[in-house]
Image (cartoon, helix red, strand yellow):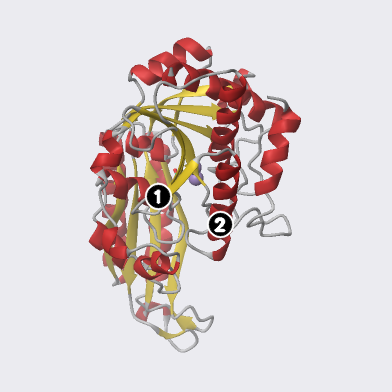
């Protein structure tokens, strides 16, 4: 696979969803942009004589061989992005999967079992708030009734968004037969860090995914006039929120963990009014589940202490929680033996992590020289991406014969 050949297919997807002015990509699930990405995938799959289906949860599957066959070898990732995210997070795994099918055929591989490229829905959770929603629904890790009630920031329900895309909301839910037919899943993903750059390696293998969770903090105070309310008389939820953000940063550094508040919502959000309410979403991650639990507990405790000081109230709700994933099964061991690539953990969640408790799974990473992700500066060279396709093809060839 040449860099030019990778760039050709990559270039057919990259114009879709560009925010312009260096703003990266905005590809939110079930929006018109997402539907254009889905159309791109279907076209590329049909061009390869792959049989395309969309499952009850909106995940798309492009099959080489019998979709009902046993022991399928599946690769793929997602096409949705965070707002103003990078180009590679997700799409690199989908484009590489399609090209790996091309390379398997050119190598004369005749699969003994079905091979598929999958596009999972709402992996980022950027629109409806729950990451890996498509794979969680597939595996029964998220309640479909609860999913249908999820709303985006404009108030649109997931049920209405998928209905608009032609899906039947009543069919949302676990798909055990489909899951049982998958023998192996391999997700190729851009690295979201610079370990491979430091190691001067184009491709790496995942050893583990850190446990991580999303927690919504709701702060309630007393709205009032910014000009006439004495400082001593205030019950300002923004103070409790700000304190919580700083406490999260301090607790993460003290525990070798990661804690981020990148999203807030304030009401009434007026320059000359003391906020009545404020919400902040905490993204917390740690190398093990015990550290993660202690980290979140200490942040919650600090928030409550500050709330008492401010005369405000705070409530925390867990929006999603993902346990530790260790990629140590036969597929990962085969990948380690076959690929001669460095092995590294990641703090980023992936559909491969969700599937790994049901299917033998491996993850490949492609070097990202900036190490940046979830921002426009995310990068990967065409040459490294082409190497990633070859390594993915090597692994799929072993798995499907
Ligand atoms: O947030 C994550 O870890 C992933 O990129 N969805
Ligand atoms: Mn991501
Ligand atoms: Mn991703």
Q: Is residue 304 visible?
A: no
Quadrant for the C terminus in the image: top left
> Picture quarter containing residue 97?
top right
What residue lies at 38% left-to-right and 38% top-to-bottom?
Answer: 67
What residue lies at 66% left-to-right and 32% top-to-bottom?
Answer: 369
Quadrant for the N terminus in the image: top right
Task: Depth check: give the residue in front, 381 or 387.
Answer: 387
Q: Residues within 10 Å of mark 2 (few under 14, many from 20)?
A: many
Q: Position of residue 302 (x, y in %)?
A: 30, 54
What residue lies at 28% left-to-right and 43% top-to-bottom?
Answer: 139
- In the image, residue 15 sits, relative to residue 329, either above or below, namely below
**Which dot, 2 or 1, sits closer to the camera?**
2
Disc 2 marks which residue?
27
Task: Depth check: give the residue in front, 245 or 290.
Answer: 290
Residue 283 numbered tag: 1
Using residue 371 as the reference point, say whether residue 400 is left or right of it. left
Q: Position of residue 276 (x, y in %)?
A: 37, 79
């Amino acid at each position: 696979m040449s860099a030019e050949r990778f760039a050709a297919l990559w270039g057919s997807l990259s114009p879709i969803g560009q925010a312009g002015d260096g703003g990266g990509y905005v590809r939110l699930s079930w929006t018109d942009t997402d539907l254009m990405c889905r159309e791109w995938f279907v076209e590329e799959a049909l061009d390869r004589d792959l049989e395309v289906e969309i499952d009850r949860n909106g995940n798309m599957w492009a099959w080489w061989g019998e979709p009902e066959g046993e022991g399928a070898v599946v690769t793929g990732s997602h096409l949705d992005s965070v707002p103003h995210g990078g180009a590679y997070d997700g799409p690199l795994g989908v484009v590489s999967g399609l090209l790996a099918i091309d390379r398997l055929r050119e190598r004369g591989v005749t699969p003994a079992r079905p091979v598929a490229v999958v596009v999972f829905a709402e992996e980022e959770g950027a629109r409806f708030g729950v990451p890996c929603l498509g794979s969680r629904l597939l595996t029964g890790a998220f309640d479909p009734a609860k999913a249908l009630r999820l709303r985006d920031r404009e108030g649109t329900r997931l049920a209405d968004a998928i209905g608009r895309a032609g899906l039947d909301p009543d069919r949302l839910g676990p798909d055990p037969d489909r899951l049982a037919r998958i023998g192996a899943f391999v997700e190729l993903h851009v690295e979201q860090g610079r370990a491979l750059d430091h190691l001067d390696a184009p491709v790496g293998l995942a050893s583990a995914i850190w446990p991580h969770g999303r927690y919504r903090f709701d702060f309630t105070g007393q709205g009032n006039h910014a000009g006439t309310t004495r400082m001593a008389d205030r019950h300002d939820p923004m103070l409790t929120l700000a304190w919580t953000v700083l406490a999260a940063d301090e607790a993460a550094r003290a525990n070798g963990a990661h804690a981020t508040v990148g999203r807030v919502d304030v009401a009434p959000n007026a320059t000359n009014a003391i906020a009545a309410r404020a919400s902040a979403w905490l993204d917390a991650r740690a190398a093990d589940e015990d550290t993660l639990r202690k980290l979140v507990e200490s942040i919650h405790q600090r928030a409550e202490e500050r709330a008492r000081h401010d005369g405000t109230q705070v409530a925390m709700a867990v929006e999603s929680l993902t346990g530790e994933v260790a990629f140590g099964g036969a597929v990962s061991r085969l990948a380690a033996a076959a690929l001669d690539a460095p092995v590294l953990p990641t703090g980023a969640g992936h559909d491969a992590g969700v599937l790994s408790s049901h299917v033998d799974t491996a993850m490949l990473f492609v070097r990202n020289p900036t190490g940046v992700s979830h921002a426009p500066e995310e990068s990967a060279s065409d040459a490294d991406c082409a190497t990633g396709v070859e390594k993915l093809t090597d692994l799929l060839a072993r798995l499907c014969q």
